[in-house]
């Protein structure tokens, strides 16, 4: 940090977009100062990243910001492409390799796919994958991208699934969960919000009033947001981007952020938030969504489930069988437990069922 401060100045957060922009500006300006007069007719570019890798011990909260500032034609104003990523490799060396691949893909895309930003997004994780790096924010700026809508580009990250599982939106742009949600409590309402209604706001209002009564939330910052799943946006078979922007903009009038996610199951939604905070998470929902939470089809693929063949076993039936001298109860209890009940003659068990207890 001392070395970095000497070059770029001090910073409150070293792994942040602000730090990245400072680095890009400094390096690009050096190119212009040193080569601007000597290399007329040349195009300049600068690449930078600031990354927190996986610690030797503890949870993997590795993430980073990447960026490239470049000219498409000599003497024009530079363009910028900024990324925020999460890194999932389990050791530092693999993370360094992934960073190199992502940086190479970004620089290549900036020069050869600048007119096709949707294809540039598809290129980013070439030779990588969501199990190694997740890109959860992208921002294009400059003369090459005057007609590019950054919110739609961030929606594409989530839609493709192989790039990001969630992105938080405001009226102006997409943001990362870590930027707004890090170590804060959160209250989320899932819905279609097409458009947001008074009922939606009343649910959030009432839920918040109950939520803040939790002792663990005393003095805590609380982020309130609406959440829309990609399944909802794709309900008609394809995404209507204008409709998507209308939903985001109308929700912004209520002062709330909007999360677009690939998490149809609620338990996966809470896992997403756990990347950024250990504080309390609350989810408010209508009765129809509440009933869906208990639909077993969403959990059939998970490990440690309950075998269907055991669902009809009840303690009261075991007690009734013991009282009647019916040995079938022994198949309903663990073998060692059944042997212990018999040996100690528990719960009214009697070696001779005809004998009075």
Image: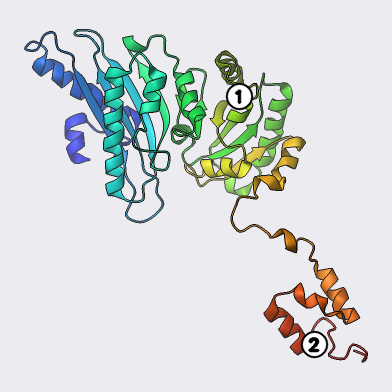
| Tags 1 and 2 touching, CB below 8 Å | no
Q: Where is residue 242 in the image (x, y as percent from the top left)?
A: 57, 13
Near mark 2 (Cα within 10 A), the count class, few <14, some 14-19 or many ≥20, is few
Q: Where is residue 69 in the image (x, y as percent from the top left)?
A: 26, 20
The part of the image, by quadrant, that contains residue 67 is top left
Q: Which residue is drawn at 24% across and 27% down?
A: 47
In this picture, residue 224 sits left or right of residue 43: right
Q: Position of residue 199 (x, y in %)?
A: 74, 25
Q: Which of 294 and 171 is in front in this view?
A: 294
| Quadrant showing the N terminus | top left
Q: Residue 212, relative to residue 26: is it above or below? A: below
The part of the image, by quadrant, that contains residue 20 is top left
N-terminal-most mark, 1 or 2? 1
Coloured how? rainbow
Distance Cα–Cα, label 1 vs label 2: 61 Å
Q: Residue 233, which numbered label?
A: 1
Q: Which of 21 and 245 is in front in this view?
A: 245
Element under label 1?
helix
Q: Which residue is drawn at 65% across and 41% down?
A: 211
From this viewpoint, is residue 218 visible? no
Q: Residue 308, relative to residue 273: is it above or below? A: below
The residue identified by callout 2 is 345
| Quadrant showing the C terminus | bottom right
Q: Residue 41, relative to residue 279: is it above or below? A: above
Element under label 2?
loop
Near mark 1 (Cα within 10 A), the count class, few <14, some 14-19 or many ≥20, is some
Q: Which of 336 and 25 is in front in this view?
A: 336
Q: Residue 40, relative to residue 318: is it above or below? A: above
């Amino acid at each position: 940090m001392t070395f970095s401060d000497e070059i770029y100045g001090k910073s409150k957060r070293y792994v942040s977009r602000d730090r990245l922009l400072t680095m890009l500006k400094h390096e690009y300006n050096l190119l212009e100062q040193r080569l601007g007069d000597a290399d007329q007719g040349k195009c300049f570019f600068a690449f930078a990243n600031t990354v927190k890798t996986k610690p030797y011990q503890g949870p993997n909260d590795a993430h980073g910001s990447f960026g490239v500032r470049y000219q498409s034609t000599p003497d024009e104003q530079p363009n910028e492409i900024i990324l925020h990523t999460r890194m999932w490799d389990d050791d530092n060396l693999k993370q360094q390799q992934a960073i190199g691949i992502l940086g190479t893909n970004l620089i290549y895309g900036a020069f050869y796919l600048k007119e096709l930003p949707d294809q540039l997004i598809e290129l980013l994780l070439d030779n990588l994958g969501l199990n190694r790096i997740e890109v959860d924010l992208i921002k294009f700026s400059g003369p090459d991208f005057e007609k590019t809508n950054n919110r739609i580009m961030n929606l594409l990250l989530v839609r493709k699934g192989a790039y990001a599982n969630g992105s938080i939106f405001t009226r102006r742009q997409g943001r990362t969960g870590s930027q707004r949600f890090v170590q804060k409590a959160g209250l989320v309402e899932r819905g279609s919000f097409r458009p947001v209604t008074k009922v939606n706001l009343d649910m959030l209002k009432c839920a918040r009033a109950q939520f803040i009564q939790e002792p663990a939330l005393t003095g805590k910052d609380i982020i309130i947001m609406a959440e829309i799943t990609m399944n909802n946006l794709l309900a008609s078979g394809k995404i209507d981007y204008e409709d998507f922007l209308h939903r985001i903009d109308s929700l912004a009038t209520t002062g709330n952020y909007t999360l677009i996610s690939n998490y149809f199951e609620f338990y996966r939604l809470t896992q997403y938030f756990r990347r950024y905070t250990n504080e309390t998470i609350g989810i408010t929902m209508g009765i129809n969504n509440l009933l869906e939470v208990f639909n077993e089809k969403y959990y059939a693929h998970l490990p440690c489930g309950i075998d269907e063949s055991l669902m009809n076993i009840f303690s009261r039936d075991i007690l009734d069988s013991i009282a009647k001298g019916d040995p079938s109860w022994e198949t309903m209890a663990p073998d060692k437990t059944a042997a212990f009940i018999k040996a100690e003659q528990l719960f009214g068990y009697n070696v001779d069922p005809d004998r009075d207890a």
